[in-house]
Image (spheres, helix red, strand yellow):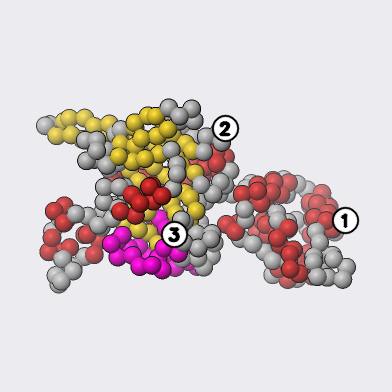
Amino acid sequence: MTDPDTLAQALRTLRGDARLQGRPDGKVSQGDLARVFGVSVPSISSWEKKTDAKRPPDVHLDKYARLFATPRSFADGGPVLFEVEQLTAEERVRHDELKRAFGMESEPLNPLKFPPGEPLTVVCAELPEELQAAREYADPLAPDHVELYSYADPDALFELYSYLRQVNPNNRIRYKLVTRLDRDDFHTHLLLLGGVDWNNLTRETYDLLDIPVRQVGREGIEAGAFEVRDAGGTGRTLVPVLKEEDGRLTLREDVAHLWRAPNPYGRDGSTVTIFNGVYGRGTYGIVRALTDVDWRERNFRYLERRFGGAPSFSLVSRVRIVTGIVTVPDWTDPNIRLHEWPTDSG
């Protein structure tokens, strides 16, 4: 950990190097920092003392790192404090560099944490009527109607929606069937559950955005698959692993896809994220890779290290099923990762 006096010198240097536009002297004062951090001027002064300085709490050191990570903080007469999610990829790198210089461990970039106040819509497929159990409960006119009986991937929806509510307490979060979307939903951050067989928006989004991954529905290949192109243009077909047991096929390993990109349907800054498996087990597994308490931070750090906060990225992964239980993919294991884009070479 950086000692308080060395840290105080670093904080003084940062403040001296920053410039505020629209001020006669162009300087950033301790009062400016006190106002934007929500503390007193004496607190700022105690953190910047030349000797016997006090170490700021980590929550305020993170504010220093966010503030000085970008010159945008000081544009138009600021300072203005941005949330981590509002920083660009380069600014996030600078934010992490400052935190390490302050002796802090940087938090991994969480792709499921969105800027406060921005709405999110989880888009689900509707389960075909012939597959809906207890049809009387799926009937909207039935006295005991349960809406989720008509949803495909309800386990993935429950897992994802619960986690989104936890980490985005100040965002409006809704889930909808793809058949019930309205035009305003397309301007939100979209999170699409399920593949091209039942989720029409997933199918159209694959067609619209140009990445070297394509899902083949089960009508095209008996078990369904993902077709990918490697950096050299070589194509591969990635199929689930099925085994016949007691006269029926059981799923031993699914293939699943995580894809994040700018939202092609919405306003600037909104995103689309696809969680998609050949089967529902894969969809559930790829969601849990980012929500499971024991594995998510490890996977967050891999995504941050591998893609560096890129606005668009794609990862195709194995999802193993053991005695009927979906295991959580560990993306630090190269045997679990099947295809990544962009490639290391870009």
Picture quadrant of residue 173: bottom left
Ranked by sequence position, the earlier of labels 1 and 2 is 1
Tag shown at residue 345: 2
Q: Is residue 305 visible?
A: yes
Tell me residue 268's x, y (percent): 53, 60
Per the rendered image, the range of residues in magenta is: 164-191
Numbered disc 3: secondary structure: loop
Question: Which residue matches tag 3?
Answer: 265
Q: Are marks 1 and 3 in contact (CB under 8 Å)?
A: no
Image quadrant in which the C terminus is located: top right
Q: Amino acid at mark 2?
A: Ser
Give amino acid for label 1.
Lys
Amino acid on which disc 3 is placed: Tyr
- Residue name at image x 68 percent, y 59 percent: 63
Image side of residue 221 versus residue 72, left or right: left
Magenta-drawn stretch contains 144: no
Disc number for residue 50: 1
